[in-house]
Image (spheres, rainbow, N blue to C red):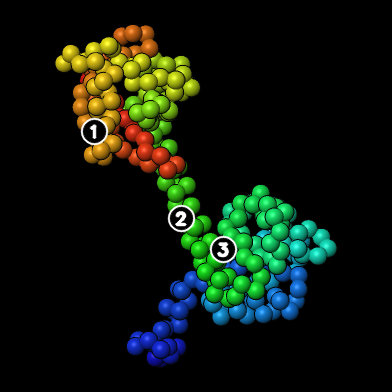
Amino acid sequence: MPKKIILTTSAQPLQLNELAEVKRPSILYIEDDAITALVQKNALTRNGYLVTHVMTGEKALEAMAGEKHFDLILSDINLGNGIDGTETARQVLKSHDLPIVFMSSHTEKEVVEKVESITNYGYVVKNSGDFVLSQTLKGALRLFEANKKMALSEVRYRTLFESANDAIMLLTRERGFSDGNPATIKLFGCRDTAEFATKTPDDLSPLFQPDGKLSREKAQEMMRNALENGSHFFEWTHKRSDGSEFPATVLLTRMVLNGQKVLQATVRDITK
């Protein structure tokens, strides 16, 4: 039997099984005005969204507790009697992680501040038009996915950071060290991360390096090279908290953390 197809405007017809693979974002739409909801739901559907509409915050919580998956919540703020949109969002976020976009005809400072107290991905004034709303929803979904990937990346980095055999630490030229993994704390003989974070490269180095240069001046030179070139590898004489010295290799790598340039130092004891 020949495969059924759906005719499209493209040169190649789209088969039913291919169409099923195209993911349409699922939205839980909370709006207490039936006419407004009908118009908006139709507009959202035309723009490619699967829309489930409820009229109250309580019904929204019931929907979220059900088996259906939602990619985003679009909610009016004033929902008449019962809990409003912001309280609904607050309760949803206790057990679900998804983007929430608010809609309202109100632009007063108090309303905006109320929304800002909740993690949200946008605020759209009603009657802004289908295009504005659709773009806001697309942006919210993209930002949410980007944040999820970033959070996962941070978890992976922290796992590697904590489990590495080499001493790995973070520092800046201005403030010194800010973090170190367990191998770092052991290598330098510190009590814990809090104590290590009070140190500077100067504290963990003898006064002079083997080439006769002051450790303080040479450390600044090494960090400057890493910041300018992206990374820098060199040998260094370090000093533990008890004053004992040891030779090491150091790899400084430039990173951006919370919008700030920092250095990751990987230190390996090469005592023979």
Instruction: Give the residue pinned by disc 2.
Output: 146
Instruction: Give the residue pinned by disc 3.
Output: 71
The residue located at (23%, 25%) in the rendering is: 249
How many callouts does the rendering have?
3
Amino acid type assigned to the residue bearing label 1 in the image: Asn
- Numbered disc in front, either 3 or 2: 2
Q: Earlier in the sequence, mark 2 or mark 1?
A: 2
Amino acid type assigned to the residue bearing label 3 in the image: Asp
Instruction: Give the residue pinned by disc 1.
Output: 225
Q: Quadrant of residue 61?
A: bottom right
- Whether residue 69 appears in this view of the structure is no
Amino acid type assigned to the residue bearing label 2 in the image: Ala
The N terminus, quarter of image: bottom left
Q: Earlier in the sequence, mark 1 or mark 3?
A: 3
Where is residue 101 drawn, in percent x and y? 61, 62
Alpha-carbon distance for marks 1 and 3? Answer: 45 Å
